[in-house]
Amino acid sequence: MSLDFRLVLILMGLALGIRSWHFATTEVTSRDSIHYIRMAWDISQGRVIHAIRNSEQHPGYPFWICAVDTVIGPLMPGSLAERYQRSSQVASIIASVALVPVAYMLSRQMFSSWGAFLACLFIQVLPAMARLFADGLSEALFLLLVMSSMLFGYIALRGQKLWPYALCGLSGGMAYLVRPEGALFPVAFGLVLLGMTVQRAGAPWWRQATALALGFLIMAVPFVAIVGKLTSKPTANRVLTADSVSAPVPPDSPLIASWFTSSSHGMGREAWAFWIFLGMLARGTLFVLWLPALLTMIFCRNHVWTQPGTIAVVIACTGLEVLLQRVAATMGYLSDRHMIVIVAFAAILAGGGISEFCKRFLGWRRILVAGVLVVPVFAVGIYRTVEPLHANRAGFKQAGKWIAANTPIGDPVVDPFCWTHFYAGRLFLEAETKGLPITHPRRLLVVVDRSASKHERLPVQSEDKLKEKGGTPVFTFESSRRRTGDGVVVYAVPLGS
């Protein structure tokens, strides 16, 4: 058994262990995942074209949820909402474990086996990425497809064979079906191919370019034909039209985001966007790994810059950086989720660079230096990564279960947080507009969060105003944990006849 194979097995075991822990300890699914589940549900009910045209998400991840749910969904206990939560989590877990060998092989294009091992180790324990990999989010699948496109691109640019170009375009097209920025990577590899052709003064290139383009277009064209535009994401369309907003409520509700406000240190949007991008990059790399990544690009030129694929990835990441700063300046927010590709490539550079640096030492000194550089990052990363997902949101799930068990399914639920509406099963009834049983006299069920958070960007109603309208509390949840965010109350507000 080769060293590479053994190291990949160790990394896959670590990834599966972390993801299994998250799967077992998740209190509620991410709010973002509810949008994906809604689309997946429509697709599973045969409303495929409707789902693609009317959703604000690209369809790649919802289709992946459907595929996984078809296999494991009937085996999952609990309500339909819990079934889809688990199916979406398993979909992400499968993608995150499959990411390990792809990221490892990509790292091996530049660095040694141990450099690739450290790179993949960092990817698995950096909280900005690893905490997304077991949630019902598209990031694990997106990163898998983007890194597959990178890997095939590295292989393609070193030779004249057509198949790696086709697979680079195909995986890039699949990444585009998950998130629109996936298109940047096959385009970047195409630009480098063109540059290499010019440098070689007329070397044959059109067959390779055609294979790359066809691989991408096979995946992208049907989606564009259905929606009639390059992307269905409103954030991307606002960025393309430079239509800025002052108080954004993005449909994908980023998990960890920075928001532009009038008190943002007096900075204008453009300056704030650049500053926040740097801050997100630093936070994503645990405030330290950006430095070895930068030093690797400077001092390990023979490993990094001799590869045409690296130039393509840097071009793509630069384009992504420009787009993200435009998102921040236009929309007034930037999320850790947006940074995942750049942070992952920084982790690859950092892992490879640390490995090369350690080679300067012999014997026990090499082990000591590696331990000093790697163990603190691993310890802090794993400590922050393995915290249960959304642990302080259990009240919303309990409220949803209570509504499902104690109210007619036709009673409307107003839930700006989405969780209670989802766990009450109302998401799966949105296509039903008539014939649902309701309470007489009619009433509205309104969910209120009793935390210290102000939720300024959500249409939250205060308890005092609900009481003025005749509302009475019908369900209250107070957690025994001493954490803010657990208190949830449901009010029944009369609607009249």
Image (spheres, helix red, strand yellow):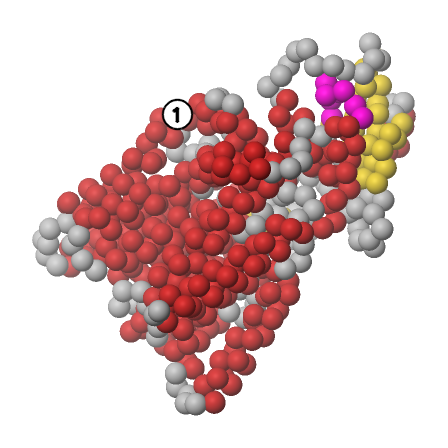
Say which quarter of the image contains residue 403: top right
Say which quarter of the image contains residue 36: top right
Residue 221 among those drawn in magenta: no
- Name the residue located 90 percent from the left edge and 23 percent from the top edge: 470
Q: Residues within 10 Å of mark 1 (few under 14, many from 20)?
A: few
Whole-percent x, y for residue 196 in the image: 19, 57
Question: Which residue occupies the foreground of this view, 423 or 35?
Answer: 423
Say which quarter of the image contains residue 474: top right
Residue stretch rendered in magenta on the structure: 406-413
Indicate the secondary structure of the residue bearing disc 1.
helix
Question: Which residue occupies the foreground of this view, 77 or 383?
Answer: 77
Examine the rendering and report whether any part of residue 350 can be seen. Answer: no
Residue 407 among those drawn in magenta: yes
- Name the residue located 44 percent from the left edge and 76 percent from the top edge: 354
Left or right position of 362 against 485: left
Image quadrant in which the C terminus is located:
top right
- Name the residue located 81 percent from the left edge and 16 percent from the top edge: 439
Whole-percent x, y for residue 103 in the image: 40, 59
Against 303, residue 439 (above or below) is: above
Question: Which residue occupies the foreground of this view, 245 or 417?
Answer: 417
Whole-percent x, y for residue 390 in the image: 68, 49
Image quadrant in which the N terminus is located:
bottom left
Left or right position of 143 against 261: left
Left or right position of 356 against 155: right
Whole-percent x, y for residue 487 in the image: 82, 43
Against 181, residue 471 (above or below) is: above
Residue hosting label 1: 226
Q: Amino acid at mark 1?
A: Ile
Q: Main secondary structure of the magenta part?
A: loop
Examine the rendering and report whether any part of residue 167 can be seen. Answer: yes
